[in-house]
Amino acid sequence: MMKLVLLILGLLIASTSAQIRTKGGTLIAKEGESLTLRCEVEDPSVAIIWRKNTEVVAVDDEILDTYGGYEISMEGSTSVLTIKRVEPINSANYSCALAEPEVSVTFVIKVQVKPLVVISPDTGVYHARVGEKNLVITCHVKEGNPKPGVVWTKQFKAAKLPEDIKREHGGARIVITEVKKHHAGKYNCLAENIAGSDRATIDIHVAEPLQGEREEKPWVKNEDTFIPVRKNQNASFWCTYDGTPVPQVEWLFNGYKINFNDEKFKKTSETAQRLNGYSKSTLTVGDISEEAFGDYACRISNKLGSVTAVVHVSGRPGPPQLSFDESELTWTVRAFDKILEYQLCHRLENADHFLPEDCNSVRVKKSDNNGDDKWTHTIDLSTFLEHGNKYHVQLKARNALGWGSMAKDALHVELQRIEKEEAKGASIISIISSILVTLVTMYLLF
């Protein structure tokens, strides 16, 4: 009996699967080409559904994803889905399914993308001097699938690099520990995969050191101490610097030198520019995650010393800027994601800590934000504090990613007593009363 049941189930499954004659598989496509997917069915009267991963692209002869560059047609009992121009975003699982019965076949599309490379520094020509330390040239692969291989050569004759040049980060970065005359020339970065290749070139000019050149300690600065970012989007920040001899640049995360092989920094790139009288180093963290929120330090060093500029980068709200005028407290917080709540804390001037019972939630107003990354709010502190006492006030804000940091420094505030005004009012009332008594007495006498 059990064998008969299993046999019947097997026949049912076979008959169900037979509704789609086409078999799925893996398809390789090159970027820019067209790609056709064919799905032959036994009964073309049943609704045919095309999906990209879980999203419906087309039903029968109607395209639902009008921005995807698709065409749909029926050739007898075969549904034909065409991607007119394949893009990297088309690397996905496409399925052809029937509404009744619920069966489907899947096509795994892998898009081959030609490499695209840029060189940092991006000046085209780099002017170095003999004796310059740690000259770093990086070949950034911006696009490419499968992952391209990177090769550096000197001159267009594909000559090998000088032996005293180090290769780092899988060969994408070259480091000249100490610049010499033989390092002058054109350096070519070639990235290549099965889809094609791309090349970028930088020309290094090497001059003799200036006689009597004045050595200077390095300096560094950045424009902000906090930069708000959006989670899973690219985040860029930079520092400007200079010094003689030419300084070395290093980026650190939470006190440690960035490891570009770390999962959270795999899409991170560093670029450099020589501007009028100073240099600029830019760090871009691709698809920044919460694990990559933190303190980024730009460390500049030469033989005369080392200096650092730090910027805090986060999707959570930044430290508020506080200001006080009479009884009104105003603050500005930077964040891209919507602020959900503020928390105002106060303590007496001689107290050591902010206690939980001395912290109050403050509601966000629509007028706090005008569509940018700044949120500004004003409240009357007389609602929370007593007149005549001296307080320290702190504040922080919260969005969907969590609470941000408090202000850099607590704000000292004092609400003036109002007894003098009350006394002044009482004095006026007393004078008026005396006048009234005098007038009444005179009236009775006469």
Image: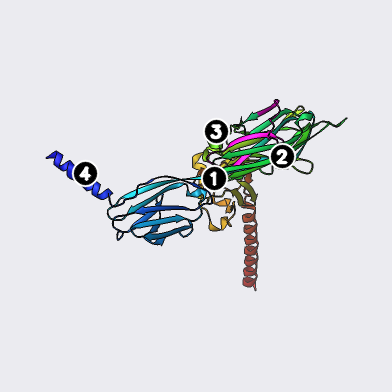
Secondary structure, mark 3, is loop
Residue under label 2? 202
**Between discs 3 and 1, the one toward the N terminus:** 1
Residue 396, image quadrant: top right
Mark linked to residue 10: 4
Residue 286, image quadrant: top right
Residues in magenta, as a range? 140-166
CA gap, disc 1 to disc 4? 43 Å
| Residue name at image x 75 percent, y 35 percent | 185
Mark linked to residue 113: 1
CA gap, disc 2 to disc 4? 66 Å
Mark linked to residue 262: 3
Three-letter code, disc 3? Asp
**Between discs 4 and 3, the one toward the N terminus:** 4
CA gap, disc 4 to disc 3? 49 Å
Q: Residue 104: x, y in percent?
A: 33, 50
Look at discs 3 and 1 and give the one toward the viewer: 1
